[in-house]
Amino acid sequence: MQNSRGFTLIELLMVVAVIGILAAIAVPGLLRAKLSGNEASAIASMRTIHSAQMTYAAGCGGGGYAPSLADLATAPPGGTAFIPADLAEATPAGTPKSGYEFTITATGASVLEAGDTCNSASAASTSTFFVQGDPDATGTSGVRFFATDETGQIRADVVQLANMTAGNPLQ
């Protein structure tokens, strides 16, 4: 008589089936958590950009706001940049940050010419600005679109926020 130890094929198939069922239950929750984390990061990035714009206006732009992320990433002589490098690169032409791309649109009147700012910005500082944060891949990296302006209100919608006037989104 032989003493055979081990699992039968049926037992192994049952274990694989149970693991497959558990994975099917867990994957959608994991994807939702990833989307939620990306959106939370985008909101934090919007706050960072707004704070950087306020700092830029107070100390570098003569009361005006930076016209681009690149200008916020340029440090004044002897100082530090207004935003971190990973956020400065999170443009539609660059590398997304946590699945989101950010764009600053300079609006309003010119306040201080480019060469006169403390960091020699690429364009003149302006009296108002508009920042939008869009998912790199809508539905995959994020569902909501975000926007803010000099008022500091962060707006969110499931469609792109193309403009804001007095803190209210216009589509």
Image (cartoon, rainbow, N blue to C red):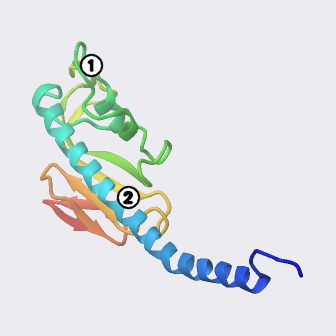
Of circles 1 and 2, the one toward us is 2
Q: In which quarter of the image is residue 157?
A: bottom left
Using the image as rendered, state which of residue 126 and residue 147 is in the foreground: 147
Q: Give the residue type that dot 1 points to.
A: Gly
As drawn, 171 above or below 153: below
In the visual, does 27 lie left or right of 37?
A: right
Task: Give x and y (percent) for residue 135.
Answer: 42, 60
Label 1 environment density (alpha carbons within 10 Å; few <14, some 14–19, many ≥20): few
Q: Name the residue under label 1.
A: 115
Residue found at x 44% / y 55%? 99
Residue found farthest to the right: 1
Using the image as rendered, state which of residue 130 and residue 47 is in the foreground: 47
Residue found at x 27% / y 66%? 156
Residue found at x 49% / y 42%? 94
In the visual, does 170 lie left or right of 7?
A: left
As drawn, 72 above or below 156: above
Task: Give x and y (percent) for residue 37.
Answer: 35, 60
- Determine the secondary structure under disc 1: helix
The numbered disc on residue 38 is 2
Q: Is residue 140 visible?
A: yes
In the visual, does 22 lie left or right of 85?
A: right
Residue found at x 39% / y 38%? 86
Q: Give the residue type that dot 2 points to.
A: Asn
Residue found farthest to the front: 1
